Image: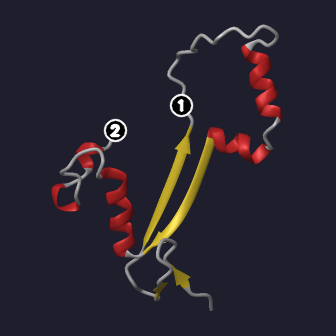
Amino acid sequence: MSKTRCHRCGRDLNAGALTYEVEVKVRSMFDGVIPESESHADETEIERLIRDMAACNEEELNRQVYEDDVFIMCPECKEAFMESIYSHLHPQAAPDHGRAHLIH
């Protein structure tokens, strides 16, 4: 029987213990604006993009568009993870003050 471990701290998580599944999904966004590029004498912006993309492997290109991960965490690591995400947004972004108002 395999042991479940916290993906953040590595602590063993016994059967029946309080654990959290944390899903992280990252998607590229397009705000509808295509910035004007500096003109290059011998290369258009599209040609540069094609050249840059050709230098990447398929996994790198996919990760630029979409990436998702799932982590299993103990309660302490879940709180530390959430704190690290939200604390820079607002000084009151702590569990006892609620985080719902910071989302979206």
Neighbours of disc 1 within 10 Å: few (<14), some (14-19), many (20+): few
Q: Mark number for residue 29?
A: 1
Q: Residue at x 38, y 67 (%)?
A: 78
**Rendered location of residue 25, percent (x, y):** 53, 49
Relative to residue 8, is residue 59 depicted above or below? above
Q: Judging from the image, what secondary structure is the residue with disc 1 in?
A: loop
Q: In the rendered image, which residue does mark 2 sit on? A: 104
Residue extending farthest to the front is 41
Q: Residue at x 54, y 25 (%)?
A: 30
What type is the residue that disc 2 sits on?
A: His
Count of numbered marks: 2
Neighbours of disc 2 within 10 Å: few (<14), some (14-19), many (20+): few
Q: Earlier in the sequence, mark 1 or mark 2?
A: 1
Q: Residue at x 83, y 33 (%)?
A: 54
User: Relative to the observer, which residue lies in front, 37 or 30?
Assistant: 37
Can you say which quadrant of the picture contains the C terminus? Answer: top left
Q: Judging from the image, what secondary structure is the residue with disc 2 in?
A: loop
